[in-house]
Image: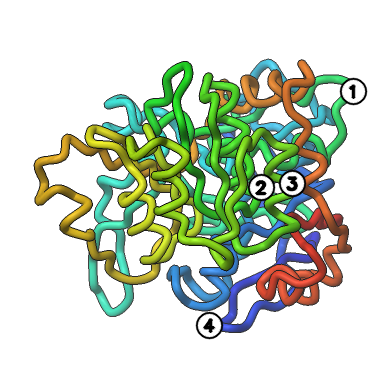
Amino acid sequence: MSMMKATVFVAPGRIELVDKPIPDIGPNDALIRITTTTICGTDVHILKGEYPVVPGLTIGHEPVGVIEKLGSAVQGYVEGQRVIAGAICPNFNSYAAQDGAPSQDGSYLILSGKCGHHGYKATAGWRFGNLIDGTQAEYVLVPDAQANLAPIPDGLTDEQVLMCPDIMSTGFKGAENANIKLGDTVVVFAQGPIGLCAAAGARLLGATTIIAVDGNDHRLGIAKKMGADVTLNFRNCDVVDEVMKLTNGRGADSSIEALGTQLTWSQSLKVLKPGGTLSSLGVYSEDLAIPLANFAAGLGDHTIRTALCPGGKERMRRLMNVIAANRLDLGVLVTHQYKLDDIVAAYELFANQRDGVLKIAVKP
């Protein structure tokens, strides 16, 4: 049996690089040889035990690679072709997908748990590194390949498209969910890779005043390059007061929360105008409280929207078109490179946000 190296979740606080069998594929699948993948903030939640996965699962959900083997029913692709697949890989057959929420594909299923326990598993459209083995490995099986494989346009590097499977798709979805109109003011809380992509997406959608909030001046500098008009370091000012000054007391049309903490959640609501939209992208690990005064006791016509990044080949095609047309360069977010053999060290760097890290290109 042929073997490969794979990064697996062992227990909270512990991942390991182990040998696993290279997956066998079915008629609707594809086997992808990974050329580049990366580590996501969600992977850190998994590492810390804040998002539960089964021990022994290969983690990671951002694949760039080459088709090694195609299932017999998969048409329109060739072995050796460079492709990506979204972090969300729906089959488009579920009630959720056909009801307009393909990222929740399969969430309606009752899934078996330990000791005979059964329960509901949210975000089941996210399969890589959640329900099935993921991408921080030498190979990954892509299910429903016909729906999920997206060919990489000629001339684009792995690093240029590495953000498409998750970070770019998620950040752009945050902007799309923010109900942005031409001339809007949008506040983006947290300028990690997702927040940076949300700021870029807001500009592409027509916002003319984009306010980026973070506590790291280096990241705020990158936010300027990605489309932010104003940057606020929350360590040096009262963010809510500053936004109100910038909008002459009117409040922002929209806010995008891209971190996942109570503080940023509360501030995202406080900066809104009456009738404004809060677009939530954070992964939360504890209950949230809504500040009553700023929620206008529920009478303020506010909209709160959450999102899981859309997947599927059409979403990936559109995102790569943005890059191929030079509307946005996300290769600048790749600040470090590590070999797969050094994945544990890469996690240590990324989880502790040292050395100016934004995203790490992990190369098998």
Tag 2: amino acid? Glu
| Mark 4 and mark 3 residues within 8 Å of each other at the beta carbon | no
Residue 217 position within the rendered picture, expressed as x and y whole percent measured from the top left: 71, 59
Amino acid at dot 4: Pro
Return the disc, 3 or 2, that comes first in the chain's sequence: 2
The residue pinned by badge 2 equals 62
Q: Are marks 4 and 1 in contact (CB under 8 Å)?
A: no
Element marked by disc 1: loop
- Which of the two discs, 3 and 1, labels the residue nearer the N terminus? 1
Q: Residues within 10 Å of mark 1 (few under 14, many from 20)?
A: few
- The residue at which mark 4 appears reads as 12
Quote the CA–CA distance across marks 2 and 1.
20 Å
**Spatial separation of the CA atoms under disc 2 and disc 4:** 21 Å
- Mark closest to the chain's N terminus, 2 or 4: 4
Q: Quadrant of the C terminus?
A: bottom right
Q: Residues within 10 Å of mark 2 (few under 14, many from 20)?
A: many
Name the amino acid, label 3: Ile
Q: Position of residue 135 (x, y in %)?
A: 68, 53
Residue 26 visible at all: no
* Residue that numbered label 3 is attached to: 222
Label 3 with label 2: CB-CB less than 8 Å = no
Q: Report helix, strand or loop for mark 4.
A: loop
Report helix, strand or loop for mark 2.
Answer: loop
